[in-house]
Image (cartoon, grey):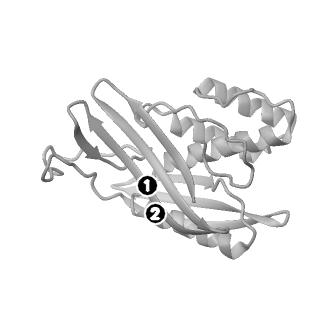
Amino acid sequence: MTVESRTLSATREAFELRARLEAFEGDTLVRTRSWDCRVARGFRLVARSSSSCSRPKTPAGADALTGGTSMARAPANRSGKVLCHPSGERWTVELRLDENEARQGCQYTVYLNRVFAAETAARSAGEQVVAEWAAGRIAVRDLMLQELAATYRRLRETYQKMQPPAVPTTTSAWESAIGSWEELGWIAAVDAARLREHVRRAFAPEAGGMPRRRIRPDTESDSTL
């Protein structure tokens, strides 16, 4: 079992917790669960689902539940496509996600931060993530942050003179790093463009700041740090 991500931050009004849990049997994803909740400074728990697309506000009181807990409304119309790509003797998973609501549409392309021994395992994992995202249990921002962190770790493990020496935590730092990797030939232009789009969306004002992530030394699992 691997914990994909877990972050805790605070504002003047509340504490915010984001977490994702994935359980694997070998390379097969068998169970996932995500949390995105907000604890107001007054100890009133508010669970919510985040997205990088702007949404109309829910009328006040519409989500009120017994005990002071409020749930986010259902996600917009979502669909996704899973593409599996051979990488040596293993497989990578590309997700193409579409989100539409009231004439507004968003399209995302992200890669899972794991590699798989078999195509069937890769496709199963991708389909599971798409289903979780379509149900509103996964935020696309988290998928983007996972790919960014996994890319940094992979390059750090491949190249001795890794730059920067620590995971970037700001828009400018990420853009500088991605530009350097592309110039050095460590990543292709198409991958650099996708990572820049991840940075743009993940660091958008409505998405909140990017949490610091610690790089783990293990290489067996490409889970988020």
Q: Which residue is mark 1?
A: 34
| Pointer 2 with pointer 1, Cβ within 8 A | yes
Q: Amino acid at mark 2?
A: Glu
Locate residue 23 relative to residue 72 in the image: left or right.
right
Which structural element holds mark 1? Answer: strand
In the rendered view of the protein, which quadrant contains the N terminus? Answer: bottom right
Residue holding disc 2: 132
Where is residue 125 shown, x and y percent of the image? 60, 67
**Where, quadrant-wise, is the C terminus in this rendering?**
top right
Left or right: residue 82 versus residue 130 is right
Gap in Å between the C-alphas at discs 2 and 1?
9 Å
Residue 22: x %, y % from top left: 53, 59
**Relative to the observer, which residue lies in front, 135 or 9?**
9
Q: Quadrant of residue 180?
A: top right
Quadrant for residue 195, please give it: top right
136 relative position to 163: left or right:
left
Q: Residue at (45%, 55%) from the top-left corner?
A: 138
Residue at x 58%, y 26% (from the top left corner): 170
Question: Would you say residue 73 is visible in this rendering?
Answer: yes
Which residue is rendered at x = 71% and y = 39% of the image? 152
